[in-house]
Image (cartoon, rainbow, N blue to C red):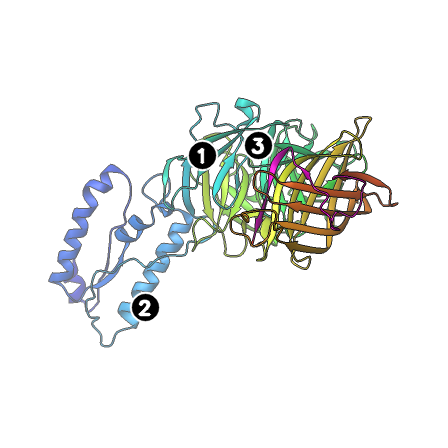
């Protein structure tokens, strides 16, 4: 055949046969490619096409589940290999007969969005694989198994290497105290997770050690307008929860909803959710921004924020989606990890695990897999979509006794910079009054701050040149803005100290954690009391 082509004055172009994972391909195609190499030697007039065996062997995620045909992204990549080969070997050489070139080495490919990067199988046996949640804290993957253990265990596993198709390693079970948890989302500014409770309406902050503290609850009658826009109303199962670090808010997606809701991270005076006034929700059923053209139906399951946009899944659909925060669909990407039953659920952003390729992790609700898919650079930053700024700070969670109200215990969660101009700064606290009513303070602005080294504390904390942080700020008390607070926290190893004074918008003292008569926590001498549980960590 080659001789016949050459006899007509034409030039044959022959590539290597592509790699595939069937036993037939593996057994026979290497021999065919050896024969093609022999043809290259016998007929130097042949223009060598791309080495598709080497390319797909190095990029196996671009082969579909039938082990023969490329995925849609694989076809795109194959066209690119052809174009690169022809530009180099036809248009990049002189004369009518291209000079034979050495067997090419595949060029590293930046995969298009939707390419499968890694796939990890969870260790739990059925039905322990069932569950919607996944989270990433910059180092580990986390998930819960609501349908098996009732969401009272926070599971942690190692991030698998790129290209991995294997079982989880480093599995650790962390008991959850204070709540049963369904969907979770990591908040890098607080170094904690936001979590949806098993009742479908309670929203918690969850530490990495498993302590859950209620922040607010969604009132189904008033704070889910449209009742998810489905006939039976919003389901109790919450498949998607996302922390949005660009404005310190929460996105909330009940199972099979047509509407994703958007809340502040603090509750009102009744500890009810506060919808974000400018963008209270996003709909996925309104053409042309619906997902029916790809799925055959409208549905939202998981949601995550990694920057300017939302990434969404639809239960049972073979695509995941990218939307603006005002509801415009800007992209959709194939979710094709297996040909049988699958259901993409919650998502989590990760721009750290694979340095050259940001990914979105997707938990499959049926099969016990968590998979990483490529996304465009800058679209999926972990922890809520922002990069924490440099600068000295103190963070931690603790419980501390209060003298106002008498006998109360304050739950504290802090992430505060030594310079108030460096943001974000977080301080959350909750406590109960004498009647048993829970009250909350949520910091909105750190107005001033200072860090210092207490000579009585030795040695200094690891990785820090200071051990004491004090400051003032304003915030919301039981949902009402205009409250004020001052504080001082000390990282003293196993003897951490806390002082916190909170006044309501009218200036009435409502919480004092400290010694002696209530006074400004930042003025000497120190008024700190020993925390009863938890830890503060100072870091330069």
Residue, disc 1: 369
Query: Which image quarter is the C terminus in?
Result: bottom right
The residue tagged with tag 1: helix, strand or loop?
strand
- Would you call the spot at circle 3 few (<14 residues within 10 Å), some (14-19), or many (20 or more)? many
Q: Quote the CA–CA distance across marks 2 and 3.
A: 57 Å
Residue, disc 2: 87
The residue tagged with tag 2: helix, strand or loop?
helix
For image coordinates 13% across by 63% down, the residue present is 43
* Depth check, front residue: 55 or 207: 207
For image coordinates 22% across by 70% down, the residue present is 98
Q: Specify start and end residues of the magenta stretch as a single range.
A: 515-539
Residue 300 can be seen, yes or no: no
Give percent across and percent down for residue 145. 53, 28
**Within the image, what quadrant is residue 234 found in?**
top right
**Within the image, what quadrant is residue 169 found in?**
top left
Q: Earlier in the sequence, mark 3 or mark 1?
A: 3
Closer to the eye: label 3 or 1: 3
Q: Earlier in the sequence, mark 2 or mark 3?
A: 2
The residue tagged with tag 3: helix, strand or loop?
loop
Give percent across and percent down for residue 206. 61, 35
């Amino acid at each position: 055949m080659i001789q016949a082509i050459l006899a007509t004055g034409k030039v044959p172009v022959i590539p290597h046969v592509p790699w595939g994972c069937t036993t037939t391909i593996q057994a026979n195609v290497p021999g065919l490619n050896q024969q093609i190499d022999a043809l290259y030697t016998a007929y130097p007039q042949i223009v060598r096409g791309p080495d598709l065996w080497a390319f797909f062997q190095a990029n196996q995620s671009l082969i579909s589940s039938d082990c023969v045909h490329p995925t849609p992204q694989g076809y795109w990549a194959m066209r690119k290999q052809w174009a690169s080969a022809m530009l180099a070997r036809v248009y990049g050489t002189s004369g009518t007969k291209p000079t034979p070139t050495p067997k090419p080495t595949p060029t590293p490919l930046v995969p298009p969005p939707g390419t499968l990067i890694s796939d990890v199988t969870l260790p739990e046996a059925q039905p322990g694989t069932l569950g919607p949640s996944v989270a990433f804290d910059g180092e580990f993957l986390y998930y819960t198994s609501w349908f098996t253990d009732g969401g009272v265990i926070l599971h942690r596993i190692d991030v698998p290497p790129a290209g991995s198709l294997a079982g989880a390693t480093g599995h650790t079970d962390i008991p959850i105290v204070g709540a049963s948890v369904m969907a979770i989302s990591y908040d890098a500014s607080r170094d904690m997770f936001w979590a949806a409770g098993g009742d479908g309406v309670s929203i918690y902050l969850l530490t990495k050690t498993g302590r859950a503290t209620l922040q607010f609850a969604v009132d189904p009658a008033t704070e889910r307008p449209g009742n998810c826009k489905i006939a039976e109303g919003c389901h109790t199962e919450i498949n998607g929860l996302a922390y949005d670090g660009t404005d310190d808010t929460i996105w909330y997606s009940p199972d099979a909803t047509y509407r994703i809701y958007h809340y502040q991270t603090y509750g009102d005076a009744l500890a009810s959710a506060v919808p974000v006034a400018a963008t209270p929700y996003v709909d996925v059923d309104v053409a042309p921004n619906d997902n029916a053209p790809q799925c055959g139906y409208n549905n939202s399951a998981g949601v995550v924020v990694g920057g300017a946009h939302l990434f969404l899944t639809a239960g049972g659909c073979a695509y995941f989606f990218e939307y603006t925060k005002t509801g415009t669909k800007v992209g959709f990407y194939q979710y094709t990890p297996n040909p049988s039953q699958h259901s993409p659920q919650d998502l989590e952003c990760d721009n750290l695990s694979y340095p050259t390729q940001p990914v979105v992790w997707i938990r499959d609700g049926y099969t016990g897999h968590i998979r990483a898919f490529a996304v465009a650079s800058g679209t999926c930053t972990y922890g809520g979509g922002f990069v924490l700024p440099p600068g000295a700070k103190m963070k931690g969670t603790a419980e501390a006794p209060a003298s106002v109200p008498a006998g109360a215990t304050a739950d504290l969660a802090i992430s505060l910079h030594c310079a108030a101009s460096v943001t974000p700064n977080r301080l959350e606290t909750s406590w109960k009054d004498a009647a048993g009513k829970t009250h909350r303070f949520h910091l909105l602005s750190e107005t001033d701050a200072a860090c210092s080294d207490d000579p009585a504390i030795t040695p200094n904390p690891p990785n820090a040149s200071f051990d004491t942080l004090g400051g003032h700020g304003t915030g919301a008390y039981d949902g009402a803005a205009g409250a004020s607070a001052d504080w001082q926290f000390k990282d003293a190893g196993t003897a951490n100290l806390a002082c916190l004074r909170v006044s309501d918008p009218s200036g009435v003292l409502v919480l004092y954690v400290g010694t002696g008569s209530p006074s400004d926590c930042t003025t000497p001498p120190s008024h700190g009391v020993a925390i009863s549980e938890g830890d503060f960590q100072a870091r330069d």
